[in-house]
Image (spheres, helix red, strand yellow):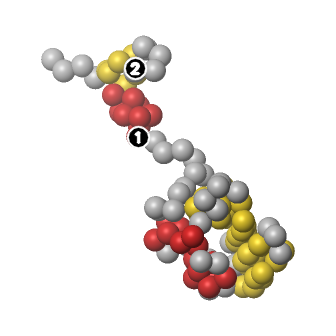
Amino acid sequence: MKSLFKRNSVNRNLAPASTAEKIATTPPIMTHTANDRVSSGLYPENDILDEQVDSNDYQVEVVLNNSEVRIILLKDESGRVQFRSIYEKRNKMLKVIDLGQGLIFKGVIAG
C-alpha cells in the first residue's frame, strides 16, 4: 500500500505529500526578477518604464505588489537602486523616480 505521507526533509516530521510538495515549489512572495512578468511586459507600466528608462540595462525587482500598489526597483550592475516605479492600481497613476534626479514621469496610464 502506498503511503499518503512523505518525510519532510526540513524538520523530519511527517507531512501530507501535497503539503511537502507545495513547500518545496512555492516561490518567495513579492520577489520577482527580470525573467518574469516585468520583462515579459505583463504589467501595464512596462511600456512607460521602457520609454523613460532602458530597463534592459538594469536588474528589475518587484518589491511590493498588492491590491493597491506595485513598486518596482531598477538596480544597476552593482546592485544599487537607480529608479523606482510606483503604480497605484485604483487610479492607474504611475510615478517613475530617478533617484539621482527626482520625478521623471507622473501620469495616468491605461491598464
Q: Secondary structure at mark 2?
A: loop
Vertical arrangement, residue 24 with respect to residue 107, above or below: above
Residue 1 % position (x, y): 15, 17
Quadrant placement of the C terminus:
bottom right
Can residue 64 be seen here?
A: no
- Identity of the residue drawn at 40% across and 21% down: 8
Vertical arrangement, residue 43 with respect to residue 15, above or below: below
Task: Give the distance between the C-alpha atoms of the residues marked 1 and 2, in whole angstroms.
Answer: 14 Å
Q: Secondary structure at mark 1?
A: helix
Query: Crowdedness of circle 2 by 10 Å Cα count: few (<14), some, many (20+)?
Result: few
Q: Which residue is mark 1?
A: 25
Can residue 73 be seen here?
A: yes
Specify the farthest residue to the top: 12
Going by the image, does 74 lie left or right of 103?
A: left
**Pointers 1 and 2 in contact (C-beta within 8 Å):** no
- Identity of the residue drawn at 75% across and 76% down: 95
- The amino acid on which the numbered mark 1 sits, given as a three-letter code, is Thr
Res. 75 mark: none
Q: Which residue is mark 2?
A: 9
